[in-house]
Image: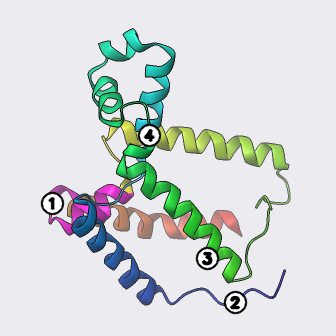
Amino acid sequence: MSAPRPYADPYLAGVGLGLVLLLAFVLVGRGLGASGAFATVGADAIHAVAPERAASLPEVAARAAESRGNPLRDWLVVELLAAAAGAALSARLAGRARVSIERGDDASARTRLLYALAGGTVMAIGARLARGCTSGLGLTGGATLSAGAWLFVCAAFAAAFAAAPLARRVWR
């Protein structure tokens, strides 16, 4: 692996993300988000295993009907796959592509992976309970001038600034 290149300029990356969001609206007619992709894949899986049960659940039935058994018919699934491919390509081009498990000195790789799985599961459940993920709310909702999205973004930044000193103390 070559020496890693510096990270991208955050302002340039922000402009790039804004352009991607604009292109999503123009080309597909929908914004960005992530949790909907998992909901579509889950709905298709439920429909494949237990179609009668899927039909009795309104949201699952609607998602399964929309994708017609092929999750790639959902824009959010395609978006998420493209984002993963883009991230892999970006890491490779920047010389940062490697397989590793980031962890502290007192945590085993197994413990770190279990915590990551548990945290991801809790986040996914929260995203479904909130009817969407933070990326969809912050980016797409903010771009459409949703008052709730702007309130959420302000609250999220305020909470992050409030928690930062505590996090710095714990990580030292």
98 horizontally vs 28: left or right: right
Q: Which residue is mark 2?
A: 5
- The residue nearer to you, when weighing 131 against 105, is 131
Q: Residue at x 26, y 73 (%)?
A: 22
Q: Which residue is mark 4?
A: 71
- Quadrant (top left/top right/bottom left/bottom right) for the N terminus: bottom right
As measured in the structure, the alpha-carbon distance from the residue carrying label 1 to the one carrying label 4 is 28 Å
As measured in the structure, the alpha-carbon distance from the residue carrying label 4 to the one carrying label 2 is 36 Å
124 horizontally vs 120: left or right: left
Residue depth check, mark 1 versus mark 2: number of the one nearer the observer: 2
Q: Cβ–Cβ below 8 Å for labels 3 and 1?
A: no
Residue depth check, mark 3 versus mark 1: number of the one nearer the observer: 3
Residue 10 position (above or below residue 78) = below
Q: Residue at x 60, y 86 (%)?
A: 7
First reached walking from the N terminus: tag 4 or tag 2: 2
Residue depth check, mark 3 versus mark 2: number of the one nearer the observer: 3
